[in-house]
Amino acid sequence: MDEAFDPQLIDRLKSGDERAFDVVYEAYRHRLFAYLIRMTRNRDVAEDLLEETWLRLVDRIETLRDGMKLGPWLFAVARNLFLTHVRSLGPDIGDAGEWTERADEGASPFDAVAANELASRVERGLAAMPVSYREVLLLVGVQGLTPSEAAAVCELTPEAMRQRLLRARRMLAWWLNARDGAKMNEGRHGGQRTR
Amino acid sequence: MADNGRDERWRLDTLSMLPEPRADEERAARTRARCLEVLARQRAGGQGWRGRVRHWIPALEAAGVAALALFYLGGAVRHALTLLGR
């Protein structure tokens, strides 16, 4: 997406050009929100972190280098804000990298918009994954960042990113397969069950 | 097995087709307004010394090019006059 941008965009942003800001804002606001809500699993927190991400952009506009890609920079800021938020929740939540939320607790915010059953199941699979695996799938699989861009966002080496992506894909596939198996068994033994 | 692999790939491809949850539009508009306010404040404040330097860079570049052109033109004229004097 960055490639389609005006190469002078960062320069225009630095000079306070409102239209340049609008170009960036429209290009990334939905993508950043989609990333943040899938990381936080909480609409209010995602909205707060999204606002903070944009304020960081305008606050640190002078530190941007001409010609740099804004997408990975914005995702890195959003990720750091998310990690800070998780840490602020205290030790009860555990380490940010290992923090997981129970996917089956109530309907997720996406259930309402999930166009089909598969998308809904993938959403639940993502929600059930540890954050460190979920984020790489979100950045590469959902947001379309290249693995090297995602590695920079997650502060990983390209090789570590490749390994993590592989494990994350396997984990999601395993989760979906396990669900399929459970559903099939449920269907097979459905008649014998009592509720 | 091959079917499993195809099935797995098909389902993972779904990642790129997941619906995009939308943020609250009113809040998005407020966030945009706040950001533009900060940008305007920075612009009004002259963006600090780096901003002021950046503002003058094109003018300094143009002045430098003009000075260099004059210097070479002067040299060429002087050379031509010397040749004519001979």
Image: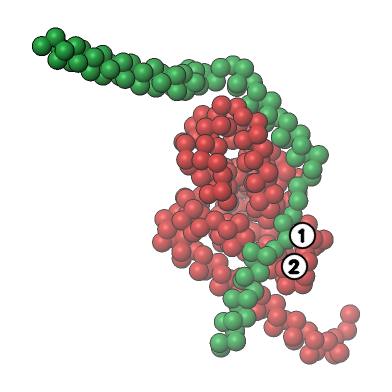
- Is the N terminus of chain B in the top left, top right, bottom left or bottom right quadrant? bottom right
Q: Secondary structure at mark 1?
A: loop
- Kindly tell me whether residue B9 is visible in this rendering: yes
Residue type, numbered disc 2: Ser
- Kindly tell me whether residue A134 is visible in this rendering: no
Identify the subunit bearing mark 1.
Answer: A
Chain A drawn in what color?
A: red
Q: Residue B53: x, y in percent? A: 45, 19
How packed is label 1: few (under 14 Cα within 10 Å), some, or many (20 or more)? many
Residue A19 position (above or below residue B1): above
The residue beneath circle 2 is A120
Residue B85 position (above or below residue A97): above
The residue beneath circle 1 is A110
Out of A9 and A80, give the one closest to the viewer.
A9
Residue at image position (68%, 53%) is A34
Residue at image position (70%, 46%) is A46
Residues at marks 1 and 2, CA–CA distance in whole angstroms: 7 Å
Q: Secondary structure at mark 2?
A: helix
Q: Residue A62: x, y in percent? A: 51, 29
How packed is label 2: few (under 14 Cα within 10 Å), some, or many (20 or more)? some
Figure quadrant of residue B69: top left
Residue type, numbered disc 1: Phe
